[in-house]
Image: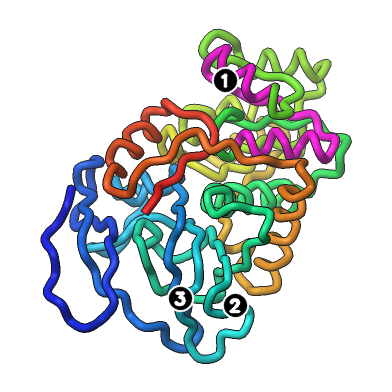
Amino acid sequence: MTGKSRPNTGAPQASAIRIHVTGGPEVMKLEDVDVSAPRSGEVTIRHHAIGLNFIDVYFRTGLYPNPLPSGLGFEGAGVVEAVGEGVTHVAVGDRVAYGQGPLGAYATVRTMPALQVVRLPAKISFEEGAAMMLKGLTVQYLFRQTYRLQGDETILFHAAAGGVGLIACQWARALGVKLIGTVGSPEKAALAKANGAWETIDYSKEDIVERVTELTGGAKVPVVYDGVGKDTWERSLDCLQPRGLMVSFGNSSGAVSGVNLGILASKGSLYVTRPTLGTHVATRPRLEAAAKELFGMVTSGKVRFDIARSYPLAEVGKAHEDLAGRRTTGSMILLP
C-alpha cells in the first residue's frame, strides 16, 4: 500500500492515503505528500486520530463520485500547527476536531478550511474526538433538526449497533424517546439495548414491520431513520404512521433508486427526506451550536463513544474490509 516518496520541494510533508482509481481496498495507497501553508481562512492540523465512516467506502468505490486522484476521510482530531489570515476562533497549539472537512482526513498532517474546525474540550480525548464528530453531529442533526424529537415518541432506527446507531440509542434514551433498533444478531441486540435502545428487532429472523406494529400497539412510528438504504426502503415506509417522515440518510446496502412517488400517497401521505450533515452545519454558527450540544451530551456522560478498534494508517485496507463487512460495532479510528 506504500507509494513512492516524492522529491523534497521545501514544503512540509505528510503521509496520506490517496486513490487514483475507484475500487476495492487495494486502490488506497499510502504516499508522501506536500502540505501547503494555510491561506486565508485555512488551518494546518497535525492529526492524533482519524475517524472511519461508511461514507469513506462510498467515495473509495465510486458510489459517490469525486475527482481523482483524491484523498479520503472527513473526520479527524489533532493540534493546530499553523493558521491563515483571518482565522480567529482557533490558534496554534489548540486541540481541535472536525467531522465535515473536505476529503483528505486520512493523513498525518493536512491543511483545510478553518470554518469546519472546532475546539475540542479538554475532557474529550483525541481518539474520542476523531470517533465522534461526523457520527455525533449526524445524530444531532437527525434528532434535533431533521425531525426534532420531543421525548414522547417511539421511533425506528436501522443498524442500531453501528457507530451512528449506538450514539442514537444513547441520545434517544437521554431524550426519553423509545428507540426501536434493527440489528443482525443477538449479540448486536444486546449491545444496542445496553446503550439505550428500548427494543430491538433482529432482521435475520424477525419481520420488521410486524414487530414494529406489535411493539407500538398498531400505531407504528412517526419517523424512521434509515442509513441502510435499498434493503430497508419498502419496509421502512410500511413502519410509518400516516403522514410520517422517512429519513433516508445512508446507503450501506446500496442506493435507493427508481422511487415512484405515488407509493408515498398509497402508504398514507408520507414524507421523505434525504438529508446530509453538510447542509445542517453549513455556517459557523450552526456548526458551533450543533457541536456545543454534542460536546455537552458527551461531557455530561449521557453519550459515550465505544471505540471498537483502532488501526495504523498504513492498515487502512484492513479497516475498510472490516467496515464494509460489518464485522465491527461502535466506532473505528485510524492512528497516524
What residue lies at 68% left-to-right and 44% top-to-bottom? Answer: 271
Is residue 17 one of those drawn in magenta? no
Q: Earlier in the sequence, mark 2 or mark 1?
A: 2
Q: Which mark is residue 288?
A: none
Q: Nearer the viewer, mark 2 or mark 1?
A: 2
Q: Residue furthest bottom?
A: 85
| Mark with earlier residue (2, 3) | 3
Can you tell which of label 2 and label 3 is closer to the viewer? 3
Q: Is residue 159 visible?
A: yes
SS for dot 3: strand
Q: Which tag is nearer the camera, tag 3 or tag 1?
A: 3
Give the structural element (helix, strand or loop) at label 1. helix
**Residue name at image x 53 percent, y 49 percent:** 127
Badge 3 amino acid: Glu
Q: Quadrant of residue 222?
A: top right
> Which span is picked out in magenta?
165-193
Q: What x and y, as percent, mark residue 33?
A: 24, 68
Q: Residue at x 56, y 69 (%)?
A: 117
Q: Residues within 10 Å of mark 2 (few under 14, many from 20)?
A: some
- Judge whether 278 appears above or below 236 on screen: below
> Would you say the residues marked 3 and 1 are in contact, meaning their CB atoms lie under 8 Å apart?
no
Residue 233: percent from left, percent from top: 54, 32
| Residue annotated with mark 2 | 90
According to the image, label 1 marks what residue?
188
* Three-letter amino acid code of the residue under disc 2: Val
Residue 326: x and y in percent read 43, 28
| Residue 258 can be seen in this image | no
